[in-house]
Image: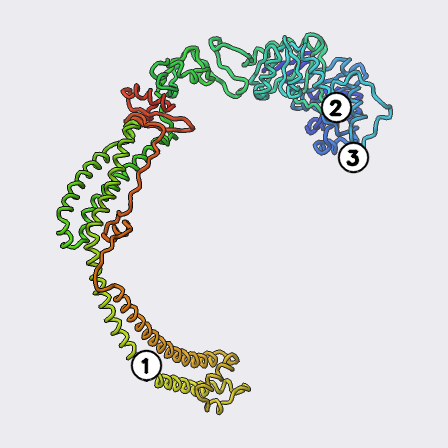
Amino acid sequence: MGRHQGQWFNLNSPFPIQLLDRAGRTLLVAIRYLDDPELIARLQARADAGVRIYLLLGEDARNRSAIEALAGRCLIRCGVKQNGTLLLLDQGADTAQGFILSGGIPDSRYWLKLTTGQCDDYFRLFCHLFWQQAGTEYLRQGQQSQQAVVSPLGTIDLNHQDALAGKLGENLRQAWSEMQYAMMSDSVSLFDLKDLPEAGRGTLICELSQLDASRAIKLGESVASLVLTEQDGMPQIVQGYDRSHWMLPSRTREQDINWCIRLAPEQLSDVSSHLARWGDAGRWQYRSRIRIADIGQPVRFADQLELEQQCLPRRSVELDPVQAPSIDDFLEASARDLAASQIRVDRERLAHVIDYKVEIRPPLRPEQAVADPLHRAWTQVRQKWSGRVDELSGMLNREASSRGGIGERILGALGSFIASQDHRRKELERELEVLASWDCALFPPSVRSERLEQLNNIAKQLHKRRERWAEKVDETRQQQEWGQKRQRLADDLRAANEAADKCRRRADENRLNSDQALEQLKKNLLDGWHAWIRDSGPQLSPQKFWDAAGMAAFDASEALAWIDKYHSQLPGDPKRTVKRLRDDYRTGQQKQERDLKELEKRQQQAVQEIARLEQALQDHGDRFQYRPSANPVELGRLLGVQDSAAIKPLLIDWPDEDLPQPGTHLVSFDRQRWLVIDSLDQLEAARQDAQRLNAIICTEKPENA
């Protein structure tokens, strides 16, 4: 935005600080931060020239350098937060002048010269703030601040309160509905957008960098036209249709003093000629609705102001592959309908004409889908069926192998019976081969029941075959076992008599050797005892219980008694040595006693075993008598038949639903079933299966998809 220097309004033209040199009587300055060295020097010069200078500043700490340089020369008061700057020269004189600046004196982007009436209004505002609102004052150079004294003249009457804290937002809201043009960025934050009236004829010009999306949308709905410019430092000016004309400082805060001003007609004429031109300079204009066909230049959307989008005359777009919701939609629906969600208006690919390219895919099996529980149910049924067939086949195979445990004489006597059994076994094997290859999932319930009954009948026949075989060979085997047992009992009785004689001889020998072994233990004890007395004497002689001469005369029992009594009072090595002597003696003695008791026990057991075997041989008898086995399981075990127990009938809880046609499979995910097919040849049957199973027909995802 270029420079403008008018009679009243100036833009991008620095305030001529030399104008302050024209002050001859008074100079009033209201500014938040006074930190420009050149300005401070000019104020010193004017004060030294006799000009009475009043400074109304913001925070004390931020103005420390100015206070130190000007205190005593100027009347300084602080503590008034303010935005913009007010300058009043020679107020009350014919040469009086006043100015309002958008910011500080050296850095203001725009400023306004005041009319005579405005000078009087703002002189009153300055005096009100200086004498009644300031918190501290500085009267002498080098002195600390003191509490500001309230004006002795009492309350200062104001012509208006436009610049006071809390007033700017109220005034602007009142003027909003009459707004014709407004250039605002920072001050927009003063508005509560919920209560903002509609400016139906107004054009609002804002800086793009100062506006967020939500406020842009709301502001765009409250004005006739919202224009956004990418230029910074735009003056804040409002032009209304009546008296609602304002110039605002570049920075405004509701709770601060804002040096704003209602523009007089002569000032407005200096500004209004430029407002329309500034509006035209705005690159972006907000529209709440627009047709794509009407877009012929770059656009920005209010919720993404930072992004600039292009609308091309024509563009080609390749869409993501579209999966049809059903197999019928895949075969019959149009590509436009199936890709409708992807061909909506997309800000990033705006164009008047768009050529779309899209791949339409049939419904695909979800990646997370797993085999439906119905497959698992039928798999379990098949496993149960094949398990029973394998079990019965194994039993038939074990029939022939179980004969290996039967003697040749028994097998020879049962030749014709065995031949009959073998013939029937081959017939049963052929039946089981047919049942093994039969898939129960492919036949109706009536056929399943017939085949299950056939399988259970084969199991009954196998059980009866085992019973007949066991009964045939049981008597011969019992007789053979009877003779073997009698011979074994006789052999065991003879071995028991020999063992008893051997135990008696060893017991007699042990008693003869026991006395000699005991004497040897006592000798070993006393030899070790005397050696211990000799070795331990120097260490234990001071003890009251020590009597080497008397102790040397002890026999074995006395030595053991002394050790039991005094060993706990002995020190380390002597204690361990004498305790080991005692333990070795007693261990040897106990071993002799145990050996003797063990031999006596064995002799007694041998006598008892002889009596038992004699009784068992008598109970076994001299003649064999056949007794049929009452327990078929026990009989089969005795004959080497592992499957001798009766076979329980196979019970199958058939699933409530049949599987789909072979070549297809059922999967499920998130409570939905999917019927997977490989080709359209399966479609007709799949439709029936899908309806019966409440499933969606789909295909497997291609490997390169």
> Of residues 384 and 291, which is closer to you in this image?
384
Q: Which quadrant: the N terminus?
A: top right
Q: Nearer the viewer, mark 2 or mark 3?
A: 3
Q: Which residue is mark 3?
A: 145
Q: Secondary structure at mark 1?
A: helix
Q: CA distance from mark 3 to mark 1?
A: 124 Å
Is 131 placed above or below 405 here? above
Answer with left or right where residue 109 lies relative to residue 318.
right
Q: CA distance from mark 2 to mark 3?
A: 19 Å
> Of residues 147 and 301, which is closer to you in this image?
301
Q: Position of residue 488 (x, y in %)?
A: 22, 65
Q: Secondary structure at mark 3?
A: loop
Asked whether the residues under the numbered discs 2 and 1 touch, taking CB atoms below 8 Å apart as contact, a structural biologist would say: no
Q: Nearer the viewer, mark 3 or mark 1?
A: 1
> Of residues 204 and 646, which is closer to you in this image?
646
Q: Position of residue 211 (x, y in %)?
A: 59, 20
> Mark 2: which amino acid?
Val
Residue 510 got which mark?
1
Number of marks in picture: 3
Q: CA distance from mark 2 to mark 1?
A: 135 Å
Q: Position of residue 141 (x, y in %)?
A: 78, 34
> Mark 3: which amino acid?
Ser
Q: Can the viewer see residue 328 in this picture?
A: yes
Q: Which residue is mark 2?
A: 29
Disc 1 crowd, CA 10 A, few/some/many (<14, 14-19, 20+)? some
Answer with left or right where residue 485 lies relative to residue 675.
left
Residue 202: quarter of image: top right
